[in-house]
Image: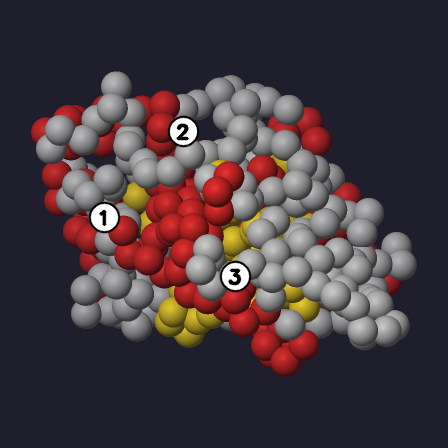
Amino acid sequence: MAPRFVIALALFFATLPGATASGQTKPRARDLGVPFDGVPGALNAITDVTGVEVGMTTLISGEGPLKVGDGPERTGVTAILPRGKASKDPVFAGWFSMNGNGEMTGTTWIEEGGFLEGPIFITNTHSVGAVRDASIKWAADRGRLFQPWALPVVAETADGFLNDINGFHVKPEHVFAALDGASPGRVTEGNVGGGTGMNCYGFKCGTGTASRKIEARFGGFTVGVLVQANHGARKLLRVAGVPVGQEIPQTAAARAADDAARQHDAIGELGSIIIVVATDAPLLPHQLKRIARRAALGLGRTGSVSSNGSGDIFIAFSTANAGAASAPEPVPVTMMSNEKISAVFEATVDATEEAIVNALVAAETMTGVDGHRSEAISHDALRQALRKYNRLTK
């Protein structure tokens, strides 16, 4: 087996625009001329919301036939810290399941108490327990527990097409590395973190992010989105309204991947997507549930119908109202009015759509378990399809 390749993506890569694990730069969807509605933040990332930090550990090792426990490994873990790793102040949050063939732990307490009390983690399906346990140890060792017990939020998508998913390769040290290395700044996309081995719409996919600035007359707030995309059938893919999945001819490898999916689902949409929405708009838990629901509309713009085999689970949080969770006496909180909240709805939909396309554009062709190959979308073919429908901006 080839030497184990472990990448802790955090402070170093956060300083490199569009950086990959190899240090190279690559274009994002806007760089290719894909048109999107709305105005992005400075980084066009979830970290445009002040205080939010992201850390990732990427695990890539081995090649050839599957040997459970040995590899090949194509997986990792992503951590999103709403107020950064130096804070244990909870944030108001809400969540929503568009289709529940997946997992996001800790949501029962969010539904009941209204607060997210720690980071959000995303990994592969069979590493949820390991990440949960490691996150508790990290918080306990550093005095970051808000209650004497912890109810971490850990979400998943399945990477078994490329990764030795039953080998349980995500270990506590990988979770610690993602947390300790979390930082503000640029967020690397594609085959990184929990998204390392993921595919969407019949192409290589993974981690993507985007953001939107809301007009000053509606508060001037920021909405940021991060996705781990592993969903959708190729024929469904739409980019900027263009049926890109139907316009780009399939290769033999893509057909093989689609055929495997169709054995489990009537339309071949096998997989999941986790969407995390962050904002600095002052929103209460019931309002954040409304925001989480709107992520479904951004997902729908890219073509998904949230089929039976898909775990499409979304969570939203607000960094406003600091200290509200720990105040010993009644404390005033601020709340955006319903008359203006639609601006946050729109920003969420727009940023979600772009984050998914960014995940597609950033991903690189990867070969994994038993030689399974997931091909990245061709940037030239994507541009050609958009040009055909007069949807290319450059």
**Cα separation between marks 1 and 2:** 18 Å
Taking the image as drawn, is residue 66 in sight? Answer: no
Look at mark 3 in the image and give the residue it sits on: 337
Q: Secondary structure at mark 3?
A: loop
Q: Residue at x 24, y 69 (%)?
A: 265
How packed mark 1 is, by other alpha carbons closer than 10 Å (few <14, some 14-19, many 20 or more), is many
CB under 8 Å between discs 3 and 2: no
Specify whether 80 is left or right of 237: right
Q: Which quarter of the picture shows residue 146?
A: bottom right
How packed mark 2 is, by other alpha carbons closer than 10 Å (few <14, some 14-19, many 20 or more), is many
Specify whether 300 is left or right of 77: left
Specify whether 309 is left or right of 3: left
Q: Secondary structure at mark 2?
A: loop
Is tag 3's residue or tag 1's residue first in the polypeptide sequence? 1
CB under 8 Å between discs 1 and 2: no
Quarter the C terminus occupies: top left
How packed mark 3 is, by other alpha carbons closer than 10 Å (few <14, some 14-19, many 20 or more), is few
Residue closer to the observer: 29 or 254? 29
Vertical relation: 141 (above or below) 21: below
Q: Residue at x 36, y 28 (%)?
A: 30
Type of residue at label 2? Arg
Give the percent coordinates (x, y) of residue 37. Answer: 33, 38
Type of residue at label 3? Ser
Type of residue at label 1? Leu
Give the percent coordinates (x, y) of residue 87. Answer: 80, 52
Quarter the N terminus occupies: top right
Look at mark 2 in the image and give the residue it sits on: 28
Look at mark 1 in the image and give the residue it sits on: 237
Give the percent coordinates (x, y) of residue 200. Answer: 34, 50
